[in-house]
Amino acid sequence: MEAVNEYARHREFDFSDENFRAVVDAIYRIAGISLSDRKENMVYSRLARRLRKLNLNNFTDYLEYVEVDDEEKKAFVNSLTTNLTHFFREDHHFDYLTETLFPDIFARKLSRIRFWSAGCSTGEEPYTLAMVWEHLKNKPANIDFKILATDLDTNVLEAGRQGIYSVDKLAPVDEQYLRWFKQTSQCTPNQKQVSKLLKKPIHFKQLNLMDEWPISGPFQLIICRNVLIYFDKKTQEKLIRRYHSLIEPGGCLILGHSESLGATRGLFENIGKTIFRKIG
């Protein structure tokens, strides 16, 4: 607590408990994100940048501006979201797709396959899904395969669309997949860009999960990892029920390693490490 107080004494802008509560209420109302008291310093640090940029000198004026300016509302949300991801994160999930889900889909002779990466961040997850698809053996011809990639943060979505990554990001990627990344005119010497072929099945779209979804489904897979942790239990349950309604019978929902179904566990069968198959 003393360390927090010391930090607060050196702040450029006043940031009262009332200001913090107003931010917490606003981000919950706008995006459903639940911020704990432990996030106070993070909130101040990220939003102080917005005050400087807008030449404002207090948080009350800033929050009033957020309410009336749609572009600043986006910037507010972007500032308070955290995006941490990498290629083939939790690789057992992708092993399941290769060894079980895709063979099951092919056995049913489906001609249309739809996956949804909900909370796609800077694109590593949907591009990993696309790589898994491209490397499948004995794949039936003429299958309409598409990946919907959505995120709340417009900045990370644009990064995903560009598909440009540092070589450090690509360091853990197996050699067989590196052929999908090339140095292009848009890259710095320390970057590579995803090939157009890998981008082809992916549609990046901004989506606030608290809003109506202009999405019809059905999906064979919804992968929503490390997203539910930002919501309270009530919102988590609501989202899982909405996902459930869009997944076809026998389709799957994949969550992050620290997430669970909670009160909605009766809707799915647990078939692996945070891999859940729709019942019915």
Image: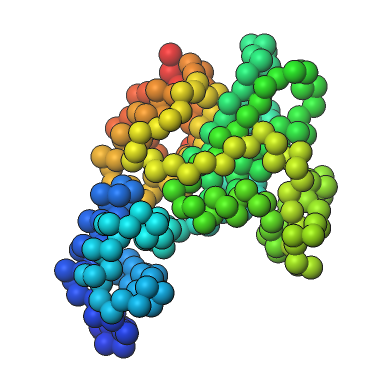
In the image: residue 192, left or right of residue 40:
right
Looking at the picture, how far across and down is residue 138, in whole percent?
80, 22
* Vertical side of 265 occupied by 175: above or below: below
**Is the C terminus in the top left, top right, bottom left or bottom right quadrant?**
top left
Residue at (28, 68) in percent of width and height: 62
- 161 or 277, nearer to the observer: 161
* Vertical side of 97 occupied by 26: above or below: below
Note whether residue 275 is visible: no
Please tell me in which quadrant of the rendered image residue 165 appears.
Answer: bottom right
Looking at the picture, how far across and down is residue 35, in whole percent?
30, 58
* Vertical side of 214 occupied by 231: above or below: below
- 207 or 130, nearer to the observer: 207
* Vertical side of 4 occupied by 157: above or below: above
Looking at the picture, how far across and down is residue 224, in whole percent?
48, 40
Count of labels in the image:
0
Note whether residue 260 is visible: yes
Q: Looking at the image, what colour scheme do you see?
A: rainbow
In the image: residue 230, left or right of residue 90:
left
Residue at (54, 50) in percent of width and height: 157
In the image: residue 149, left or right of residue 186:
left
Residue at (67, 11) in percent of width and height: 109
- 92 or 184, nearer to the observer: 184
| Extreme-left residue of the structure | 18
**Is the N terminus in the top left, top right, bottom left or bottom right quadrant?**
bottom left
Please tell me in which quadrant of the rendered image residue 7 appears.
Answer: bottom left
Residue at (68, 30) in percent of width and height: 98
Looking at the picture, how far across and down is residue 176, in whole percent?
82, 45
In the image: residue 266, left or right of residue 115:
left
